[in-house]
């Protein structure tokens, strides 16, 4: 009953719906008047021409039957005048009843009624017992992956959608959604903002400012995480009450810059979990090149463990007989002092003093250049927009104006001698083309690329990219790190670091007996014991005892399979 009352309320409250109903009512009134006049005509012809006497009920009955083309034949005319009048009534009925009336009904009643159903289908508020949930203010590229992560970990959430049709579609797709305006206190009251675990403001900078001010009226203490699209917006969003502000495009540039090879060899930390540090190290021009993982003796010399090896975009398992090539990038794990010892051991080996080449001088490209300059690395930028080139020259970098597909321009920018190239354009097709082009021009070049759509990840790796990272992936990891109150760990596009307490189904088994790798594809890189000891030298005989935590690397899909299979 409440559902239908909501539909009726929409029909009568909406101005356009009311106008439609008035127009339909006018046409029905016109149709009734026309039938009355045609019934009068029937009576006149029957009385004066046919010489018959019929009641007004019979007259109206004959008019309705004739206009609808049913023609029962129980009342008929026998003169030409009567038959001509019957033809006129049939024609009028075809136009008024069979053509105009269905169109008017659909246009002025049925279509608005369907729209009212759509408006009524999407909920306006969450359940009264929802708490510790995440409120998402927009469905953007980050949202689908974040929702998958929340559902896998059993964290409730709700998406706020301003468009009724879109909200209805999300609702039918099984997404927890409510319909409302992001600048309305009522919307956040209906979403139970005071009881929420976090509110994600992921609209434009101006709208995020409005969201923060509105939420603070309803929920003064609920954490708000905002995504900033410009550097200037960071301070403003913090001033209006945002607990955390993520400048993702600038973070993306910094993450890409952290993955290049330049100057001397150094270890690049990519994240931390409790006392453990995860890092990557280049192999090119070091004694590690050409050796197997067993022959590197890194564990014996420094205490770090190699947990995987990047090979042209694919994270390979760290098998003892895996040979490291110039393009290999091992991923290691260890304590901070162990990572420092490894960095000191490798820092004496030079890679190249030539500038790093950045292709694309937009927001991400500029952030990448700034991060490299802060590390004392020279940068050459290729950009075709004259206005951007003028702005980039203020950074004290060499700017080459033109199209990156021009060989002479790339050659002038130093593609032949550059140790690394970063592709930062926002067009995946362009980045795939440039990755293939740069790989052909310089085989030993390390290619780091931005990606927009995850579906293009395999294509850009096949084109020659060594490392790929996208805005959406970084956004998911950043928001998740804030939500779980942990440090950001960025493994790479499609990969993440997961922690899970050993489930009861695996208690007292060894890692080999658990068959985690074969069944899910996840790689167990460390085991955390209740006494805070950390087992980084994981092997087939590592025991999975109750209370221990598994530190695993893999994709969201693999982690979901783990949860589904082992509980």
Image (tube, grey):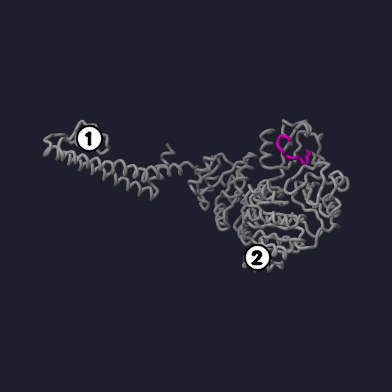
Q: Can residue 482 be spotted in the picture?
A: no
Q: Can see residue 23?
A: yes
Magenta segment includes 35 = no
Q: Quadrant of residue 418?
A: bottom right
First to last magenta residue range: 518-529
Q: Which residue bears the numbered disc 2? A: 402
Q: Which mark is residue 306?
A: none
Position of the N terminus by quadrant: top left
Q: Looking at the picture, how far across and down is residue 36, in whole percent?
A: 21, 41
Q: Residues within 10 Å of mark 2 (few under 14, many from 20)?
A: some
Q: Name the spot of residue 50 as percent of width and height, x first.
A: 13, 36
What's the CA distance linking mark 1 and mark 2? 82 Å
Label 1 Cα neighbours within 10 Å, binned few <14 / some 14-19 / many ≥20 = some
Residue 496 pos. (x, y %): 70, 45
Q: Secondary structure at mark 1?
A: helix
- Quarter of the image where one finds residue 99: top left
Magenta highlight on residue 519: yes
From the image, which quarter does the C terminus lie in?
top right
Query: What label sits on residue 61 in the rendered view?
Result: 1
Q: Secondary structure at mark 2?
A: loop
Q: Looking at the picture, does residue 127 appear above or below residue 442?
A: above
Q: Position of residue 481 (x, y in %)?
A: 68, 48
N-term mark: 1 or 2? 1
Is residue 403 or residue 234 the one in the foreground? 403
């Amino acid at each position: 009953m409440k559902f239908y009352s909501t539909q009726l309320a929409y029909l009568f409250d909406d101005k356009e719906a009311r106008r439609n109903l008035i127009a339909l009512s006018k046409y029905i009134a016109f149709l009734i008047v026309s039938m009355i006049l045609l019934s009068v005509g029937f009576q006149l012809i029957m009385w004066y021409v046919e010489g018959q006497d019929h009641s007004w009920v019979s007259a109206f009955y004959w008019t309705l039957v004739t206009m609808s083309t049913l023609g029962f034949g129980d009342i008929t005319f026998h003169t030409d005048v009567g038959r001509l009048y019957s033809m006129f009534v049939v024609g009028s009925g075809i136009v008024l009843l069979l053509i105009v009336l269905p169109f008017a009904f659909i246009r002025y009643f049925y279509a608005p009624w369907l729209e009212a159903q759509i408006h009524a289908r999407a909920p306006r508020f969450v359940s009264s017992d929802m708490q510790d949930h995440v409120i998402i203010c927009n469905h953007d590229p980050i949202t689908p992956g974040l929702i998958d992560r929340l559902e896998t970990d059993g964290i409730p959430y709700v998406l706020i959608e301003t468009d009724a049709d879109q909200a209805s579609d999300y609702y039918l797709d099984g997404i927890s959604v409510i319909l409302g305006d992001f600048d309305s206190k009522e919307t956040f009251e209906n979403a139970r903002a005071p009881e929420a675990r976090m509110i994600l403001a992921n609209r434009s900078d101006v709208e995020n400012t409005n969201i923060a001010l509105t939420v603070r009226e309803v929920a003064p203490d609920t954490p708000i995480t905002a995504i900033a699209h410009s550097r200037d917006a960071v301070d403003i969003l913090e001033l209006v009450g945002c607990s955390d502000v993520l400048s993702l495009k600038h973070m993306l540039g910094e993450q890409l810059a952290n993955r290049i090879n330049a100057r001397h060899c150094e270890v690049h930390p990519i994240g931390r979990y409790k006392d453990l540090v995860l890092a990557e190290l280049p192999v090119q021009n070091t004694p590690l090149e050409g050796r197997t993982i067993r022959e590197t003796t890194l564990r014996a010399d420094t205490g770090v463990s190699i947990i995987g090896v990047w090979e042209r975009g694919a994270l390979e398992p760290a098998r003892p007989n895996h040979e490291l090539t110039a393009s290999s990038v091992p991923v290691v794990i260890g304590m901070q002092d162990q990572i420092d010892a490894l960095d000191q051991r490798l820092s004496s080996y030079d890679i190249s003093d030539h500038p790093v080449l950045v292709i694309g001088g937009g927001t991400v490209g500029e952030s990448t250049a700034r991060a490299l300059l802060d590390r004392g690395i020279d940068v050459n930028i290729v950009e075709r927009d004259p206005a951007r080139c003028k702005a980039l020259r203020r950074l004290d970098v060499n700017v080459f104006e033109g199209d990156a597909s021009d060989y002479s321009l790339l050659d002038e920018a130093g593609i032949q001698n550059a140790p690394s190239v970063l592709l930062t354009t926002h067009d995946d097709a362009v980045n795939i083309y440039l990755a293939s082009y740069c790989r052909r021009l310089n085989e030993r070049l390390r290619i780091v690329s931005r990606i927009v759509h995850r579906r293009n990840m395999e294509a850009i790796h096949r084109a020659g990219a060594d490392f790929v990272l996208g805005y959406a992936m970084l956004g998911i990891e950043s928001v998740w790190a804030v939500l779980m109150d942990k440090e950001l760990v960025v493994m790479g596009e499609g990969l993440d670091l997961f922690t899970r307490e050993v489930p009861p189904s695996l208690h007292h088994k060894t890692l080999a007996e658990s068959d985690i790798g074969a069944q899910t594809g996840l790689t167990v890189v460390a085991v955390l014991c209740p006494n805070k000891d950390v087992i980084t030298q994981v092997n087939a005989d590592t025991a999975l005892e109750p209370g221990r935590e598994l530190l695993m690397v893999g994709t969201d899909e693999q982690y979901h399979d783990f949860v589904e299979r082992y509980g």
